[in-house]
């Protein structure tokens, strides 16, 4: 019988990549999503049935944070993470043969704005503000479940880079139109992970059955925003890029219906546990990651 993996919230940029790669490894993939024809979040029995006898449950669900933080959006951002997590936990409790591993997304944004020290799982300082509150509640709703037959791992994921969506599209457009200088001070740290490594980390955690708890999911070599834009200009063969000071960013974010936090918060996150456990990154340096992504997007 085929091994089965369940992707909750599996229709986005990361979910589609995971679906294709799991299928190429011979897995049967079930998807829980608000979008038809997938299993609906309101279909409790369908969710339980899909999770029953599965090898792994991976929860990627959550409304995008690329929006204005008004009251309605804030509520949706929080609920779309905590409520879906609770639905999945309750479904696992009802399974006769539950998955041996449940991986839940979390976010590297849980740590404070850091330009002085890197944040590790053991020594990282949890920040404050709306995004941090969401991250804390998300992890709390996950780890509240006591599931004796199911290992639980929360991935504090940095900004995911890949050639088929995610943040690369707006960044490439900035460079293309000559606006690829640093944003704000340019000193804020940019922690990132290549989507290939994100998938390989899931396989690594599946294989190493003694591991559970929280893992930082980021390259061991974060860069500053200034370095990020310089690498991107070099990779796209653009010599000039105008910087964007904070007031211009604030104005642009307002018109683009988003928040400057996504660009200005300094995320300095190190994957200390993964490195300690022996995970080897395929793309640990930004140059190689960008070369691969840009090469792939040209092919497409």
Image: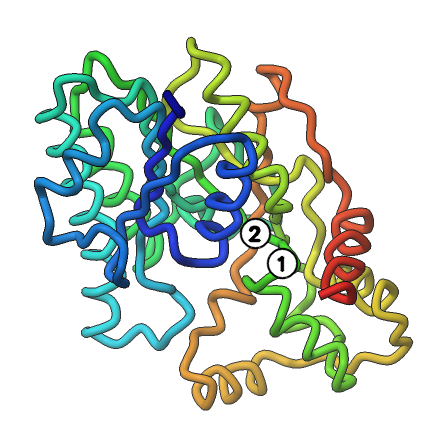
The alpha-carbon separation of the residues under discs 1 and 2 comes to 17 Å
Q: Residue at x 56, y 55 (%)?
A: 266
Place of residue 160 in the rendered image (x, y in percent of width and height, measured from the top left)? 56, 51
Viewer-closest of 176 and 260: 176
* Tags 1 and 2 touching, CB below 8 Å: no
Classify 293 as above or below 154: below
Looking at the image, is mark 1 or mark 2 earlier in the sequence?
2
Classify 96 as above or below 42: above
Place of residue 253 in the rendered image (x, y in percent of width and height, measured from the top left)? 48, 82
Q: Residue at x 18, y 54 (%)?
A: 40
Circle 2 residue: 160
User: Hey, which quadrant is residue 179 in on the image?
Assistant: bottom right
Place of residue 31 in the rendered image (x, y in percent of width and height, measured from the top left)? 32, 47
Left or right, 290 with reference to 126: right
Element at label 2: strand
Q: Residues within 10 Å of mark 1 (few under 14, many from 20)?
A: many
Circle 1 residue: 188
Viewer-closest of 5 and 228: 5
Element at label 1: loop
Viewer-closest of 114 and 154: 154
Q: Residue at x 23, y 56 (%)?
A: 80
The quadrant the N terminus occupies is top left
| Count of numbered circles on the image | 2
Q: Residue at x 16, y 49 (%)?
A: 83
Q: Which mark is residue 235?
A: none
Q: Nearer the viewer, mark 1 or mark 2?
A: 2
The quadrant the C terminus occupies is bottom right
Q: Residues within 10 Å of mark 2 (few under 14, many from 20)?
A: many
Left or right, 68 with reference to 293: left
Classify 278 as above or below 92: above
Place of residue 12 in the rendered image (x, y in percent of width and height, measured from the top left)? 43, 58
């Amino acid at each position: 019988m085929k091994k089965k993996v369940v992707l909750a919230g599996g229709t986005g940029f990361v979910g589609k990549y995971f679906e294709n790669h799991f299928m190429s490894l011979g897995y049967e993939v079930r998807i829980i999503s608000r979008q038809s024809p997938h299993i609906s979040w309101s279909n409790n029995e369908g969710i339980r049935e899909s999770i029953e006898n599965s090898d792994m449950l991976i929860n990627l669900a959550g409304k995008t944070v690329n929006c204005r933080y008004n009251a309605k959006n804030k509520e949706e951002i929080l609920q779309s993470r905590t409520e879906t997590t609770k639905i999945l936990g309750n479904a696992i409790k009802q399974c006769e043969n539950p998955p041996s591993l449940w991986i839940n997304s979390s976010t590297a944004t849980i740590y404070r704005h850091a330009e002085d020290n890197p944040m590790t799982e053991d020594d990282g300082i949890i920040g404050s503000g709306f995004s941090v509150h969401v991250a804390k509640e998300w992890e709390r709703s996950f780890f509240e479940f006591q599931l004796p037959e199911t290992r639980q791992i929360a991935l504090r994921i940095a900004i995911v880079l890949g050639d088929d969506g995610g943040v690369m599209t707006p960044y490439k457009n900035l460079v293309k139109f000559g606006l690829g200088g640093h944003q704000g001070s340019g000193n804020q740290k940019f922690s990132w992970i290549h989507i290939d490594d994100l998938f390989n980390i899931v396989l690594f955690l599946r294989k190493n059955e003694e591991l559970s708890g929280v893992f930082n999911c980021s390259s061991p070599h974060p860069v500053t925003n200034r370095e990020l834009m310089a690498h991107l200009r070099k990779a796209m063969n653009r010599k000039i890029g105008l910087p964007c000071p904070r007031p211009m960013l604030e104005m642009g974010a307002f018109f683009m219906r988003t928040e400057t936090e996504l660009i200005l918060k300094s995320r300095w996150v190190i994957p200390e546990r993964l490195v300690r456990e022996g995970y080897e990154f395929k793309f640990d340096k930004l140059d190689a990651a960008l070369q691969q992504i840009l090469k792939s997007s040209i092919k497409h």
